[in-house]
Amino acid sequence: MTAQANQIYKNLPEEESREELLRPFVLALAKETERNWLVRSSSLIWKCRNEYLRTKTKEKSILYMQGLIDQFRN
């Protein structure tokens, strides 16, 4: 699932269509976060990447990145 999201992210230009294609992968990864810390980390990274491009959700992106940093501190 992460490989497919990475391929979409790299191959499509920065448009809202890319965000729309990535959203299902990000949501699916978010559901799996309780099982494995690595899946949680990749989910936070993808959420951060997907939200950072829009001006309305940049703060949310920063909070996801802070959550990722806090996870590795623990």
Image (tube, rainbow, N blue to C red):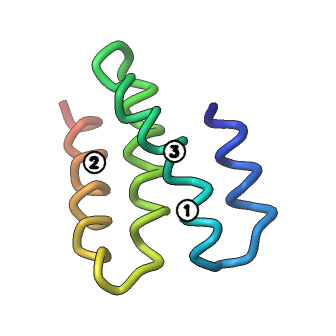
Which mark lies nearer to you, 1 or 2?
A: 1
Which secondary structure lies at badge 1?
Answer: helix
Looking at the image, residue 27 sits to the left or right of residue 8; the answer is left
Whether 4 is drawn above or below 11: the answer is above
Q: Find the distance from the CA under tag 1 to the CA under tag 2.
A: 26 Å
Which secondary structure lies at badge 2?
Answer: helix
The one nearer the camera, 15 or 71, is 15
The amino acid type, in three-letter code, at marker 3 is Pro
| Crowding near the residue tagged with mark 1, few <14, some 14–19, many ≥20 C-alpha atoms within 10 Å | few
Which secondary structure lies at badge 3?
Answer: helix
Which mark lies nearer to you, 3 or 2?
A: 3
The one nearer the camera, 2 or 74, is 2
Cβ atoms at labels 3 and 2 below 8 Å apart: no
Q: Say which residue label 2 marks.
A: 69
Q: Quadrant of the C terminus?
A: top left
Q: Residue at x 45, y 33 (%)?
A: 29
Which image quarter: residue 55?
bottom left
- Residue reaching furthest right? 11
Q: Quadrant of the N terminus?
A: top right
Q: Find the distance from the CA under tag 3 to the CA under tag 2.
A: 24 Å
Q: Say which residue label 3 marks.
A: 24
Q: Residue at x 71, y 37 (%)?
A: 3
Q: Say which residue label 1 marks.
A: 20
The amino acid type, in three-letter code, at marker 1 is Glu
Mark 3 or mark 2: whose residue is earlier in sequence: 3
The one nearer the camera, 74 or 35, is 35
